[in-house]
Image: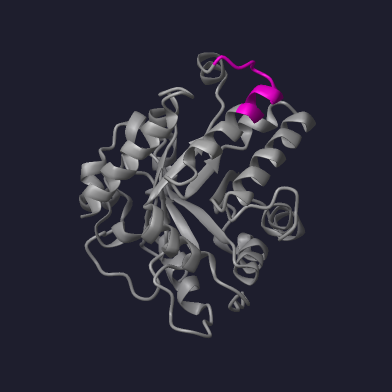
Amino acid sequence: MTETAPTGLSFGDRLSTVFATRGQLCVGIDPHAWLLTDWGLPDTAAGAEAFGRRVVEAAVGLAGIVKPQIGFYERFGSVGYAALERVLADARDAGLLVIADVKRGEIGTSMEAYGEAWLTPGSPLEVDAITVNPFLGVGSLDASLDLAVASGKGVFVLAATSNPEGKTIQTSLVTDGPRSGLSVARAILDEVTERNVAVTVAAAQPELGSIGVVLGATLDLATFGIDVSTPVTGPLPPVLAPGFGHQGAAIADLASIYGSFAAGVIVSESRSVLSAGPDRLSASIARRVTEIGAARG
């Protein structure tokens, strides 16, 4: 894989600006059936659209990042995708960074097509970053990683996830090649870090890379072979961090959980914020932004 620098601002650059101006909170857009009911909305594509657009509206001026969970729109078929397109358009128009939680993982031209759908400027589904699944091999993601870097977009590679089913695979040891003896999670993190370093940057080296990882906040990362006390060489890989709030991780523990990666952590919260309801949503977002800022000092 040969990375080249994007012609404009990189995703890492844009993320750094959001951190500096709006903080590190990412508001999930997860129109669960029960949340739609609680919000007085129908469990339909129209209800999911109204939900998503209301979350975007509430986030503007408070948080800088939103993350729609695509499955909650995909369940309605083509009308769900049409609804999602309108939510994404609102978020783009509002200047929010959008991370699509799609968890795509494929090989060859199929992975290239997924990247084109989500990362191509002007696409109806255009977002700023996507989540991807590396368990067909990180190299299988090359087409999407190349497109992301060239287009100023970002990619978050699953590495150590908060679901208990993932631990067996993610803590397993690599048995051959240059990363032999490392955990799968650590090997993924190292490859992401190396790819960020490999990107040629015309100006000064960015603070944050454009290729990030997903590291769950509820995990003891040391058991996944990840040492958070060691400084990162090169651009810091941004970390999409689910697990705060409803799942039990405390904002006050952000620095101790992520150590040397803490400055690049995107605090992803969905139910803990969304359950406040449409009338109190803005206040809920503002409170979490303040708490995260206090935890970072």
Marks counted in the figure total 0
Instruction: Answer above or below: position of 130 versus 35.
Output: below
Q: Is residue 88 left or right of residue 97?
A: right
Magenta highlight on residue 61? no
Query: At 50% from the left edge and 78% from the top edge, which residue is drawn?
Result: 198
Instruction: Answer above or below: position of 5 versus 76.
Output: below
Query: At 60% from the left edge and 44% from the top edge, which residue is drawn?
Result: 102
Residue 8 shows in this picture: yes
Percent coordinates x, y for residue 50 in the rendering:
63, 27
Of 122 and 185, nearer the camera is 122
Q: Please name the colour scheme applied to the rendered image.
A: one colour
Outermost residue on the bottom side: it is 202
Percent coordinates x, y for residue 88 in the rendering:
65, 44
Q: Is residue 203 left or right of residue 255?
A: right
Percent coordinates x, y for residue 38 in the rendering:
50, 15
Work out which quarter of the rendered image holds the N terminus and state it: bottom right
Of 151 and 133, nearer the camera is 151
Instruction: Answer above or below: position of 201 versus 31.
Output: below
Outermost residue on the right side: it is 78
Percent coordinates x, y for residue 100 in the rendering:
59, 46
Query: At 44% from the left edge and 83% from the top edge, which residue is drawn?
Result: 204
Work out which quarter of the rendered image holds the C terminus and state it: bottom left
Instruction: Answer above or below: position of 255 versus 208.
Output: above
Residue 175 shows in this picture: no
Question: Magenta part of the protein: which range?
Answer: 40-50
